[in-house]
Structures are given as structure tokens and as C-alpha cells.
Amino acid sequence: MTAPAGEGTEWVWKALSDPTRRKVLDLLKRGPRTTGGLAEVFPSLSRFAVMKHLAVLERARLILVERRGRERWNYLNPVPIRQIYERWISDYEGLWAGSLLKLKRHVEQPNERSVRR
């Protein structure tokens, strides 16, 4: 159910668009969890609903799954997020940082009109 290799990042964007899936990723950032363990965190969702969210995350390759007997362990895979960062954000870091420094200097400069009074 994973996206074909070389496919764009549309599956990642879709996966990240949902707050429940972002919460799952936040939980997995702290360490791997079983599907049952994740379902316990979302008492308002059925286990089936949690599994559907996990399927979307797996298709986007944001999680890696390891089956151990009856347990299904879910691990965060940060690579697709890093790819989005490199494609959409890193090129603009310098521009943003420069603009923010200019703004900081402007705001922190004493206002010459108020100094003269």
C-alpha cells in the first residue's frame, strides 16, 4: 500500500493534512508503538479508524511497520519529511533569515524622531 518509488510528495502532504495523523507522528517521534498502543491514545476513535490513519501514513512512507507475532510495531520514518524540507523550505532559509535580521535591526533601532524631542 506504499506509494510507488519516485512518486511525488502528494501522499506525504495528504498524510500531514490530518491532525490525528500529525498527532500519531508526534507520538512515534518519542519511540515506536504498537497499533493497539496508539489506539489507546485515541479513545474517541475505533481501532479500525486508527488503522486507516496508519495505512495513510504507511502509504506516504512516514511510518515503517514491523510485525512481531500478533503485534504490529509502528516506527517514524523522517525521510519523507526531510525531502519536503529540502525541496520546499531549505532554499528559502537564507532569504527568511536575512529578512528577519533586517526587521530585527529596524525594530531595535532607536527612533530618531523620539530621541530629538
Image (tube, rainbow, N blue to C red):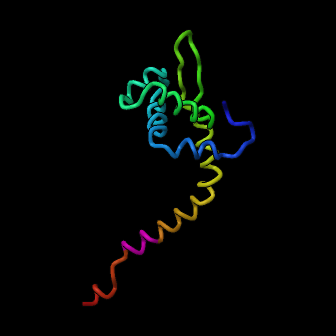
Q: In which quarter of the image is residue 114?
A: bottom left
- In percent of width and height, residue 86 lies at 63, 49
Residue 106 is a magenta residue: yes
Q: Name the residue furthest bottom.
A: 117
In the depicted view, which residue is nearer to us: 49 or 90? 49
Residue at position x 53%, y 11% from top?
Answer: 70
Residue at position x 60%, y 43% from top?
Answer: 12
Residue at position x 49%, y 24% from top?
Answer: 32
Q: How many labels does the image show?
A: 0
- In percent of width and height, residue 64 lies at 60, 27
Q: In the figure, is residue 28 to the left or right of 77?
A: left
The prevailing secondary structure element of the residues shown in magenta is helix
Q: Name the residue furthest right.
A: 6
Q: In the figure, is residue 4 to the left or right of 89?
A: right
Q: Name the residue furthest top.
A: 69
Write down the region rendered in magenta: 103-108
- In percent of width and height, residue 116 lies at 28, 89
Q: Name the residue furthest left.
A: 117
In the depicted view, which residue is nearer to us: 44 or 60? 44
